[in-house]
Amino acid sequence: MSLSRHSDTIVAPITAVGGAVAVVRVSGLTAWSVGAAVFSPWPSPVEPHRAVYGRYSHGDDGLALPFAPGRSYTGEESVELSVHGSLASVQALASACIEAGARTAEPGEFTLRAFMNGRMDLTQAEGVRDSVEARTDAQLRQANLLRDGALRDQVRAVREEVVGVLAAVEASTDFSEEVGELDRANALHVCSTVRADLLRLLDAASAARVIREGVSVAIVGLPNAGKSSLLNAVLGSDRAIVTEYPGTTRDTVEECVSLGGLLVRLIDTAGLRPTDDPVESFGVERSRFALENADVVWYVYDASVGWTPADEEAWRTIERPAIGVANKSDLASGDHGIEVSATLGTGIPVLTDVTMGVIGTNEQGALINARHAPLLQEVLCAIDRAAVTLSQPVPDDLAAVDLQAAVRALGEVTGETTPPDIIERIFREFCIGK
């Protein structure tokens, strides 16, 4: 995506094609002219934010909703055109707009223009992307917080504190006779406050990763314990093959599901047991790999058989956070872990609650993503270096370099100082129409 093309008038559907109604957005200097070319009767004079009914040049009918510059999603002159949602109608309308002078919007270009026109900062733009891609309630809540500027406000508050210290350092260096010496005690106090704020943000990085990327849960146990039945019960569908014969599952079976508002990747595995069957042996090795790399392990055993020495031996080898699951509790009570009946579907809500407790996700403040974290860590290191300098009997201005580095990195988080190539890469990850 070329940032130099932001003056073009662009067009793209901003809703999924194939529904009852679709919306096509036109944005740019000649958006209203394009609208007038494809929609009749075009209002004259145009009344922004007032929808009008009419007919399109390709034969469909619908609504046109114009937006004035500074009051649209992109901050530009725009019009949103509603038509019936068939692929044929949407394509015909988009083609008509292109013939009238627009070009097809690139992925993320509407939001890029909103960013460039000051309608949102970079973290809010990332929130737009996360809203579109959200698969769970927790992901959507965090995306909404980003779009509302929660991270922007925290980062800007930290940046103002650092800028204040930097200004005091530079003033004491350049205008010492007028402003006097630097109040080092106050500067160090501000550095300490900023450090605490940064640590709070960075401490939430793990929770943010869990919300965005989800967690993996390996379902392990001896053959015929009901692991596949449990997977199917949690999913509410027959994803894995279930038979009365041990060793049915020869490979890992993975499915994603929303549990407790979080994205969870469930991994059904082959039964843990010695075997001479080369195919089953390969499956058991995959089971052990899943066991070693999962965020949480559900160790499933047959409650009707009871907790056996083989279960105990397998349980002792688990080095990940693990939850015992007594399956087939409709046949007998289990004395190790949570009682569940995959057949009846009982006990699964309790298992979900306990799993969420083991994961320990706290959504509070979990806003930063993989781009933000190293930048905030860079700020933290720069602040620490500046504090060390201000604690020593050296000239004040030696701290300025690190304070400037901190200000620059904070600006990269929100977009003020982000290099153009990074901005382009971020918006390339968007879908067309956003």
Image (cartoon, rainbow, N blue to C red):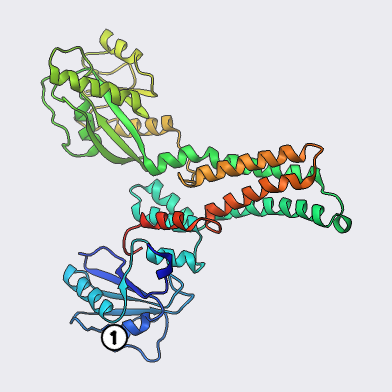
Q: Residue 352: x, y in percent?
A: 34, 34
Residue located at (47% from left, 64% from top): 115
Q: Is residue 64 visible?
A: yes
Q: Which quarter shows the N terminus?
A: bottom left
Determine whether, in the image, residue 161 is placed left or right of residue 375.
right
Determine whether, in the image, residue 113 is placed left or right of residue 230.
right
Q: Residue furthest bottom?
A: 44
**Residue nearest the observer in this picture, 160 or 406:** 406
Residue located at (34% from left, 14% from top): 317
Q: Above or below — where is 383 with respect to 174?
A: above
Q: Above or below — where is 106 with respect to 164?
A: below
Count of numbered tags: 1
Q: Residue 119: x, y in percent?
A: 49, 67
Q: Above or below — where is 318 with respect to 163?
A: above
**Residue nearest the observer in this picture, 309 or 106:** 106
Residue located at (16% from left, 71% from top): 88
Q: Secondary structure at mark 1?
A: helix
Q: Amino acid at mark 1?
A: Ala
Q: Residue 139: x, y in percent?
A: 39, 48
Q: Is residue 192 visible?
A: no
Q: Crowding at label 1, few (<14), some or many (≥20) Cα neighbours within 10 Å?
A: some
**Residue nearest the observer in this picture, 422 or 354:** 422
Determine whether, in the image, residue 195 is placed left or right of residue 223.
right
Q: Which quarter shows the C terminus?
A: bottom left
Residue located at (82% from left, 38% from top): 393
Q: Quadrant of residue 296?
A: top left
**Residue nearest the observer in this picture, 178 or 136:** 178
Q: Above or below — where is 226 with respect to 102?
A: above
The residue wearing badge 1 is: 37
Determine whether, in the image, residue 210 is placed left or right of residue 250.
right
Q: Residue 429: x, y in percent?
A: 36, 54
